[in-house]
Image: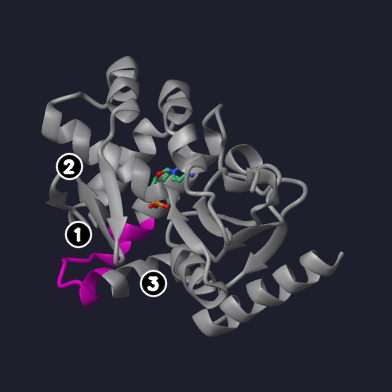
Amino acid sequence: MTDRLIPVIAIDGPSASGKGTVAQSVAEKLGYHYLDSGALYRLLALAASRRGVVLDDEAGLAALAAGLDIRFEGGDAWLGGERVGDAIRTEACGNGASKIAAYPAVRAALLDLQRAFRTVPGLVADGRDMGSVVFPDAALKLFLTASAEVRADRRVKQLIEKGMDANIQQILHDIRQRDERDSARSVAPLQKCADAGLLDTSAMTIAEAVGEVLERFKQARVQ
Ligand code: DC
């Protein structure tokens, strides 16, 4: 089957908007594959720190991205032979990912890797540029967001659940800074593309958001 016939649901939005949890659950319900594209940028940031590639070495980072040995399995991420699911979720790794994601050469180097996730019966992909750049022909494009305060609160709960330290003020500050950097960069900035639907989950439960995405997908498919 050619790629164009394999349906993609592209869910973009800011950090900690809940898009990952929602996208994963939608993928499970549809029996589709799931791509957490942010995890690729996080894995690259981690690989760079392990290999001593500094975060302002665009060419070095792009070369590292081109040969990235990664794998996702059972909700966990692997870098080479090492399980790094928790290591890539730290705030430091998220900030590093946001910095390197601003480099055009890095984004280009990760493009084929992301598109390779589009396999039958379908894919739910979440990130910042899934609908605008990586899968412009997605069957459904959504921009999923929530207020910065709600997102900071959700991130704190996530970190506490994982037994990690969490300071709400620091996290709110980091979220605002990351939003600004992700929105202001010149390549693939974080923004709702014209053909994406808006879904604000500030006052929604995860189950409600998942139900809404499934409903919009159903409607998109009958059109
Ligand atoms: O979704 P996340 O917080 O795990 O993503 C980490 C960083 O990676 C985020 O600050 C911006 C970047 N990113 C991106 O630029 N494009 C994507 N498709 C996904 C993530």
* Classed neighbour count for the residue bearing mark 2: other residues with Cα under 10 Å, few (<14), some (14–19), many (≥20): few
| Residue matched to label 1 | 86
Residue drawn at (59%, 83%), measured in percent from left and top?
208
Q: Is residue 88 left or right of residue 15?
A: left
Can residue 17 be seen? no
Q: Amino acid at mark 2?
A: Gly
Residue drawn at (45%, 54%), measured in percent from left and top?
35
Res. 154 mark: 3
Q: Amino acid at mark 3?
A: Arg
| Residue matched to label 2 | 80
Residue that extends furthest to the right in the rendered view of this protein: 223
The mark nearer the N terminus, 1 or 2, is 2
Does the closest atom of ligand 1 sit within 8 Å of the Cβ of label 1?
no
**Secondary element type, mark 3:** helix
Which marked residue is nearer to the observer: mark 3 or mark 2? 2
**Residue 99, picture quadrant:** top left
Which marked residue is nearer to the observer: mark 1 or mark 2? 2
* Classed neighbour count for the residue bearing mark 3: other residues with Cα under 10 Å, few (<14), some (14–19), many (≥20): some
Distance between the alpha carbons at the discs numbered 3 and 1: 17 Å
